Amino acid sequence: MGDLRFCAFRFCAFVVVTIGFWFSSEKAFAQGQDSTPGERNLRVMVELLPGYYDNANQNYFDIRRKLAAEDRHARISTTITRVDAPAFGRHVFLWVNRIETSKGPQISHRIATLEAGPGADEVTMRHYLRMSGEISVAELATLQPADLRRTEGCDYVFKRRADHYRGVQGTKTCRFDWDGEKVYTDNEIQLAPSSLWFYDHKWVIKSGKRITGVASGEPFWLERARIFHCYADVPGVGGGVDVPFTRYDDMLLHDRGDTHWFTAKADPTRDIPQRELALNLRAVTWHVLNEANDYFNRNSLVLSVIERLADGSIKEHGYAFTDPQAERIAMNMKWILVNCAITPRREAKPEM
């Protein structure tokens, strides 16, 4: 009997200890798990940053508005890809800028990194530049920070705003030599779900003269692009008519002003000449109004067919437009049918 009471006592003690441990464990898991706002912002920025960005609309409307040359933004595109480059940390991106100039495109490569801090609600972005040439994917596994150029004082510190992240450099802390001049920058980057904004202003320390950017001080406005899978049929058969046609397939276009050229072959048996044709796709974000009676221009996704004629001139044959968020757009001018969609045809799901 005593042994039974002793065993019961030991069991009760075990239950009490176990329950106590369970409650204390629950309290431990319930407390002290919060991160800093900066660590949360870091996770969001890591997902938000990659993409293809282009300022086709800004570049077009600067010209259409007849801005002075020094106030016009050059056409620029940026591709940001998350990559694995162990020497640079956990959150690493290959950042490629392409600027269209009168002498041809200028392309620059850099590595960008993100980490939380220094403030509790802040995220730091560092840039490591290759001053000449590209950064290839093949070298990322062994690439070292010392292989690239990073200037102390040129980092961007980001904070969250209502619908975007704003990153700024320290006031006149980013100083370096540029084309034989000692310069400084007070640049800024803004990252939103729809866009990437940045200032690129270099100032000569000695004279105070600005040598990059635009005179108005307005930032470059690069809008995030979507990738479409397109094809063209020549001629543009439709309505179930049994007429032979040639399909020009596997054209990838982004919707921020991308153009894809192809050669449509001649077919003497059907009196079809050889032609140099192209598709252009642009989600138009209006910068001005072009409506009577105070109506408002709605943004549109526009698909155009253009041709390079024998004399080198460009002819626009026609265009179709729809809602800017549409995932498909097409048109059939009978001599050509064009079709673009975000989902490739091979991945289209059956519908009832």
Image (tube, rainbow, N blue to C red):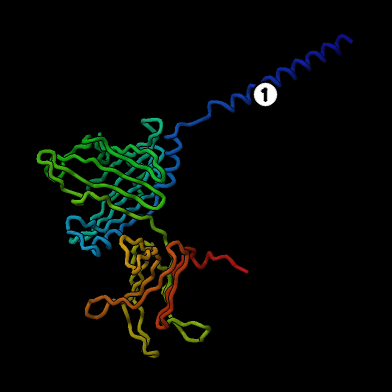
Is residue 38 visible from the viewing direction of this image? yes
Residue 318 horizontal side relative to residue 30, left or right? left
The residue type indicated by label 1 comes to Trp
Residue in the foreground of this view, choosing between 177 and 220 = 220
Residue 292 lies, with reference to residue 50, above or below; the image says below
| Image-quadrant location for residue 84 | top left
The quadrant the N terminus occupies is top right
Q: Give the residue at x 30% y 62%.
A: 288
Residue in the foreground of this view, choosing between 136 and 76 = 76
Residue in the foreground of this view, choosing between 323 and 250 = 323
x, y percent for residue 61: 27, 62
x, y percent for residue 242: 51, 86
x, y percent for residue 160: 39, 40
Residue 278 lies, with reference to residue 51, above or below; the image says below
Residue 241 horizontal side relative to residue 107, left or right? right
Q: Give the residue at x 22% y 37%.
A: 174
Residue 82 horizontal side relative to residue 10, left or right? left
| Image-quadrant location for residue 55 | bottom left
The quadrant the C terminus occupies is bottom right
Q: Residue tagged by mark 1?
A: 22
